[in-house]
Amino acid sequence: MDRQGHILNPHEDPQLPKELVLKLYKTMTLLNTMDRILYESQRQGRISFYMTNYGEEGTHVGSAAALDDTDLVFGQYREAGVLMYRGYPLDLFMAQCYGNTSDPGKGRQMPVHYGCRERHFVTISSPLATQIPQAVGAAYAIKRADANRAVICYFGEGAASEGDAHAGFNFAATLECPIVFFCRNNGYAISTPTSEQYRGDGIAARGPGYGLLSIRVDGNDVFAVYNATKEARRRAVAENQPFLIEAMTYRIGHHSTSDDSSAYRSVDEVNYWDKQDHPISRLRHHMLNRGWWDDEQEKAWRKSSRRKVMEAFEQAERKPKPSPQQHLFSDVYREMPPHLRKQRAALERHLQHYGEHYPLEHFEK
């Protein structure tokens, strides 16, 4: 699909039904709306941290649509669209970022570190690339169980420089694991451009050296991403053949709210990708061309999606934080050992004497 939404090769058109294409589009735009609201929330001091997905929505949604609902997902930290496509509610996205009493992680994780057992999405952890060998281990277990499932493991091109990537690629190939490695090559590893990360031909070119089937796709073309992931998943399950996808895209936003990307790239560069080659605008053009969408529907959807996000946002902000006396010490041991009971008692005594110095009114009683 080109930038005006026209199919370039009819033989490669996945022929997705209208309902599915609308779901792709609405998931991408809903994610974009949530990003904008939570980014501003962090800037206003309401949450501690956030990472946007601007410009990479097509890699999330195109790949998620090509998977089976039971396939296991290992994300890095910029794959919220995969979880959203699988129906994760806005309330829980917000609860996790606010760390309130509705947060399944009980407020113990940084914002954007989502996880959902029911939707087969393994909880995100911050250290870079640790999910890659973990995903291979899960894929090997699935192979041993003959479970007719696949694992997909997402990471950025920067994470591909970590030793864990080498270990994961090699184990996946030698153990013949049903896994899809999905690399989002968005141009930057925080502030380091790809021109300073490697001298070879990107990430896909590394695959053959490990014995991995590899393909490079236009990550801003949601249909190209869908086709590549669909075939990679088929080969992984049917043949126990690990597959490496490199999706070429662009990180329009800052790396995170701790980053100021204007220090290392120009406004013109960012504007080019935002205005000229955005995955959302490509798909919108395609839908307009086919008569599946119009300006009135766009306006109504933008209004209703923002209302949904704001309702979840306001609800999350009103809820208290989890009790530190309880959740600082639980969920590690089946029975709390003596040293933790002693520490919890010490915390309770401390709060009884000095509680007025802490914002305890914001925490669950």
Image (spheres, helix red, strand yellow):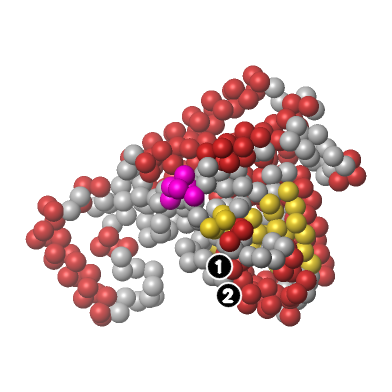
Labels 1 and 2 touching (C-beta < 8 A): yes
Using the image, determine if residue 47 lies above or below residue 238.
above
The residue lying toward the viewer, choosing from 272 and 359, is 272
- Examine the image and state in which quarter residue 142 appears: bottom right
Residue drawn at the location 69% of the way across and 22% of the way down: 294
> Percent position (x, y) of residue 201?
72, 63
Is 115 displayed left or right of 95 in the figure?
right
Is 149 displayed left or right of 337 in the figure?
right
Three-letter amino acid code at disc 2?
A: Gly
The residue carrying mark 1 is 129
Q: Is residue 52 visible?
A: no
Residue, far top: 296
- Per the rendering, the mark at residue 163 is 2
Quarter of the image containing the N terminus? top right
**Earlier residue among tags 1 and 2:** 1
- Per the rendering, the mark at residue 242 is none
Q: Which residues are magenta?
A: 259-264
Using the image, determine if residue 240 lies above or below residue 274.
below
Residue drawn at the location 61% of the way across and 47% of the way down: 250
Three-letter amino acid code at disc 1?
A: Ala
